[in-house]
């Protein structure tokens, strides 16, 4: 900073997925769009601890502080000031905090099998039909309500979803951000409030979750101890964003028209359309679609489909066996294989847990009566074909159930860089695919913060236009052609 000029505002995005996390600085201008700078990357993953698969949350939070400390230093060096921090992570999982504010144990991961045993008991208290008619939530055995039913005691405890837990440790304020609340199975999709009747039916405390907060609202300012550790400005706010990472990603889909579909492609694939109101029909329940809250009160009508977790787990298994071929080489070799190869159901729960993924994929192919060659390229092609086929089925179902005709498919997240997957998706859906941005989640996170600070204005169309203006996009046509999207 020079000549006494005011520091330029920037925004810190804490963006954590199931396998990695990062802290990024976002710079936003109504004319220049959005730019991101990665400040700190770190590993995340489940660990075997205390008899289950858990998140090492203490280590995770230490990495968040390390990233925020580095971000504060970078901003100061550039003559900038971090105005606020936004936090997004995966959904469903939570930590239990006691009355004194202490985390009682490291949070369980959704990949732990403990909640399987409680599903029948929950459904005995509330039928699946009744649950869906209110929550509109896709059935997954690890949804938060099934996990809470596992807890031996909740007396004197409050459940904070992972991004809310991070925000609590930064500010001392307990809130539940609405987009993530909508993934718990205890949220009324139409009313946008807690479904307190389900808390009663399951014997859960009425205050098991903190009060709701909407994207763009302020959670609080940083605690003195956090200010001391990080060197952040004293007035730095933590602002609620779409704290479910998919909500932030969908907010940054660079769509120019209303009738678009999106695929947030990462560890999981979230495939769906954006609606103004939930679809709570019995047909929708049977198709296992979910109605989750988006930014600005929108509905993310989607279904979870298997994702690039399958590929990353195969790579990990092959590396352990001494096979070190790059991902680019693997995808090139897979692209050279003929069409019409074997496929699997990529979102089968059999693929949820880690370890031995290539063997499990080959076993699943055998169960279909086909044979999958024992070569990495063949396994990779099977994964890509299976994901694309799953995307096409899901999008066709979404159009039918929501009464919506889709003109274009946007793929955002890590999968947008996978040219084979993008082309196969265009072929399978018979619709053009627009790929990018890779960093959709962080972009959506930063844009909600910037709007809350008054740096930019408008609704989702205006925010998305900023993303489109500053992103190199690629367009894939179903007929095996690809072209750059005019900027």
Image (spheres, rainbow, N blue to C red):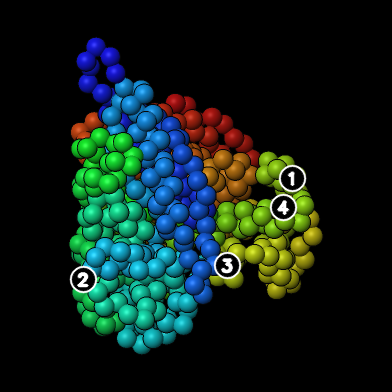
Q: CA distance from mark 4 to mark 3?
A: 18 Å
Look at mark 3 in the image and give the residue it sits on. Answer: 353
Where does the image place residue 286, in percent across and percent down from the top left?
A: 43, 73
Q: Residue at x 33, y 26 (%)?
A: 76
* The one of 31 and 41 positioned closer to us in this rendering: 41
Where does the image place residue 110, in percent across and percent down from the top left?
A: 46, 67
Where is the C terminus found, in terms of image quarters?
Answer: top left
Q: Residue at x 45, y 77 (%)?
A: 115
Q: Mark 1 or mark 2: which comes first in sequence?
A: 2
* The one of 195 and 339 positioned closer to us in this rendering: 195
Looking at the rendered image, the disc whose residue lies closer to the viewer, 4 or 1, is 4
Where does the image place residue 166, in percent across and percent down from the top left?
A: 33, 53
Left or right for 235, reference 19: left
Look at mark 1 in the image and give the residue it sits on. Answer: 325
Q: Mark 4 or mark 3: which comes first in sequence?
A: 4
Identify the mark at residue 285; answer none if there is no mark.
none
* Residue at the limit of the structure toward the right, as seen here: 374
Q: CA distance from mark 4 to mark 2?
A: 46 Å
Look at mark 4 in the image and give the residue it sits on. Answer: 319
Look at mark 2 in the image and give the residue it sits on. Answer: 207
**Kind of element beneath mark 4:** helix
Q: Mark 4 or mark 1: which comes first in sequence?
A: 4
* Residue at the limit of the structure toward the top, as seen here: 3
Q: Residue at x 37, y 50 (%)?
A: 88
Q: Mark 2 or mark 3: which comes first in sequence?
A: 2
Q: CA distance from mark 1 to mark 3?
A: 24 Å
**Kind of element beneath mark 3:** loop
Q: Residues within 10 Å of mark 4 (few under 14, many from 20)?
A: few
Where is the N terminus found, in terms of image quarters?
Answer: top left
Left or right for 193, reference 365: left
**Kind of element beneath mark 1:** loop
């Amino acid at each position: 900073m020079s000549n006494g000029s005011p520091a330029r505002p920037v925004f810190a995005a804490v963006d954590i997925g199931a396998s990695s996390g990062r802290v990024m600085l976002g710079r936003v201008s109504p004319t220049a769009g959005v730019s991101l700078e990665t400040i700190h990357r770190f590993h995340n993953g489940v660990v075997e601890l205390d008899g289950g698969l858990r998140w090492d949350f203490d280590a995770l939070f230490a990495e968040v502080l390390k990233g925020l400390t580095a971000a504060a230093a970078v901003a100061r060096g550039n003559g900038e000031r971090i105005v606020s921090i936004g936090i997004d992570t995966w959904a469903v999982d939570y930590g239990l905090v006691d009355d004194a504010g202490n985390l009682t144990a490291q949070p369980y991961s959704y990949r732990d099998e403990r909640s399987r045993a409680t599903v029948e008991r929950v459904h005995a208290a509330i039928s699946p039909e009744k649950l869906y008619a209110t929550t509109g939530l896709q059935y997954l055995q690890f949804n938060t309500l099934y996990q809470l039913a596992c807890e031996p005691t909740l007396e004197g405890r409050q459940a904070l979803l992972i991004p809310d837990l991070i925000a609590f440790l930064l500010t001392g304020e307990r809130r539940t951000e609405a987009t993530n609340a909508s993934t718990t199975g205890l949220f009324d999709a139409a009313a946008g409030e807690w479904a307190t009747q389900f808390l009663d039916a399951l014997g859960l405390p009425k205050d098991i979750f903190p009060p709701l907060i909407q994207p763009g609202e302020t959670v609080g300012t940083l605690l003195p101890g956090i200010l001391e550790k990080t060197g952040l400005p004293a007035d730095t706010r933590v602002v609620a964003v779409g704290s479910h990472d998919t909500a932030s990603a969908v907010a940054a889909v660079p769509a120019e028209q209303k009738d678009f579909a999106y695929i947030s492609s990462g560890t999981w694939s979230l495939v769906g359309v954006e609606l103004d109101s939930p679809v709570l029909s019995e047909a929708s329940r049977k198709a296992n679609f979910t109605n989750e809250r988006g930014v600005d009160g929108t509905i993310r009508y989607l279904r979870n489909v298997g994702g690039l977790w399958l590929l990353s787990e195969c790579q990990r298994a092959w590396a352990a066996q001494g096979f070190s071929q790059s991902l680019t080489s693997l995808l090139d070799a897979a692209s050279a294989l003929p069409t019409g190869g074997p496929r699997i159901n990529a979102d089968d729960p059999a693929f949820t847990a880690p370890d031995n993924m290539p063997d499990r994929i080959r076993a699943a192919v055998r169960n279909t009566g086909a044979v999958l060659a024992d070569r990495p390229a063949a396994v990779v092609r099977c994964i890509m074909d299976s994901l694309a086929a799953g995307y096409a089925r899901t999008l066709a179902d979404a159009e039918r159930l929501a009464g919506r005709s889709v003109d274009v498919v946007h793929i955002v997240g890590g999968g947008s860089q996978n040219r084979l997957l993008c082309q196969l998706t265009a072929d399978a859906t018979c619709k053009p695919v627009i790929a990018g941005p890779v960093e959709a989640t962080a972009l959506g996170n930063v844009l909600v913060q910037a709007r809350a600070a008054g740096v930019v204005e408008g609704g989702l169309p205006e925010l998305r236009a900023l993303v489109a203006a500053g992103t190199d996009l690629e367009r894939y046509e179903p007929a095996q052609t690809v072209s750059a999207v005019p900027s």
